[in-house]
Amino acid sequence: MRRLIPALLTLVLVGGAHAGTVSVAVAANFTAPMREIAAGFERDTGHRAELAFGSTGRFHAQIMRGAPFQVLLAADQDTPARLEREGAAVAGTRFTYATGRLVLWSASPGVVDDRGEVLRRPGSGKVAMADPKLAPYGAAAAQAMANLGVAAALQPRLVQGDSIAQAFQFVDTGNAQLGFVALSQVMANGRIARGSAWIVPAHLHAPLRQDAVLLAAGKDDPAATALLAYLRGETARAIIRTHGYEL
């Protein structure tokens, strides 16, 4: 036993010495599940993930200006592919980690009906959405409104946030009566946590497939490659499902 204890301590110290930290840019809609995944990642691998949340468009600009992110979890497929073409991401590492759903949500019960007809009714309350130029969920909201034929009528009432997180904040604080947000932001334990909501039919907008990619700054970094592998494992996938994403 005395011989075994030093050996076990050596294994622990070696394991700790190899643990690293990975800097991750995460689409704002994926905030809640990624915090859970990061905790599990550290528990299971010893590596630590430093998370920054924001709009995919702003992350692209920051990465191209030299921001030291090692992994990007985007809210779309186009941005990781574009980073590959621009030489800022490692070719062959891109994959879809989740497919999101857009939801029309109000923090108050009874405001949003189960067919989204509230969008056609006259009103003066603000309608929040993410900036379509910066956030894929904002682009999806714009497509949905156009396909529903309500874009022109809603235009005077629209208020835009830089990210889907800011759009959610507008509704959550009452500064907007309702808004287009990510289903994951209002779901807990497989159901809408509070307020009222309508899950926007998927055919009304382009699919919200979200890709992850290894960035050039993370090339050959063990913690970065370990995180991408962890995202594809069943522990992470189970968390992703519980937050309303499809796989």
Image (cartoon, rainbow, N blue to C red):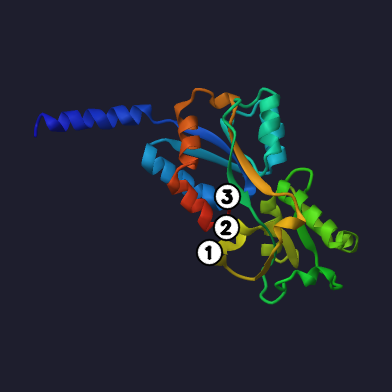
Q: Are marks 2 and 1 in contact (CB under 8 Å)?
A: yes
**Residue beneath the point at 49% across and 22% down:** 220
Task: Tell me where residue 13 appears, x and y as whole percent.
Answer: 28, 29
**Residue beneath the point at 9% across and 32% down:** 2
Quadrant placement of the N terminus: top left
Disc 3 or 1, which lies upstream in sequence? 3
Outermost residue toward the left in this view: 1
Disc 2 or 3, which lies upstream in sequence? 3
Q: Which residue is mark 3?
A: 31
Q: Nearer the viewer, residue 219 or 23?
A: 219
Q: Which residue is mark 2?
A: 244
Q: Can residue 113 be seen from the camera position used here? A: yes
Numbered-mark total: 3
**Three-letter amino acid code at disc 1?**
Gly
Q: Is residue 109 above or below residue 48?
A: below
Question: Is residue 118 toward the left or the right of residue 101 in the image?
Answer: right
Task: Tell me where residue 125 appears, x and y as whole percent.
Answer: 81, 68
> In front of the other: label 2 or label 3?
2
Location of residue 54 by image quarter: top right
Task: Tell me where residue 14 appears, x and y as whole percent.
Answer: 30, 27
**Three-letter amino acid code at disc 2?**
Gly
Q: Can residue 65 be seen from the camera position used here? A: no
Q: Is residue 230 above or below residue 4?
A: below
Q: Which residue is mark 1?
A: 190
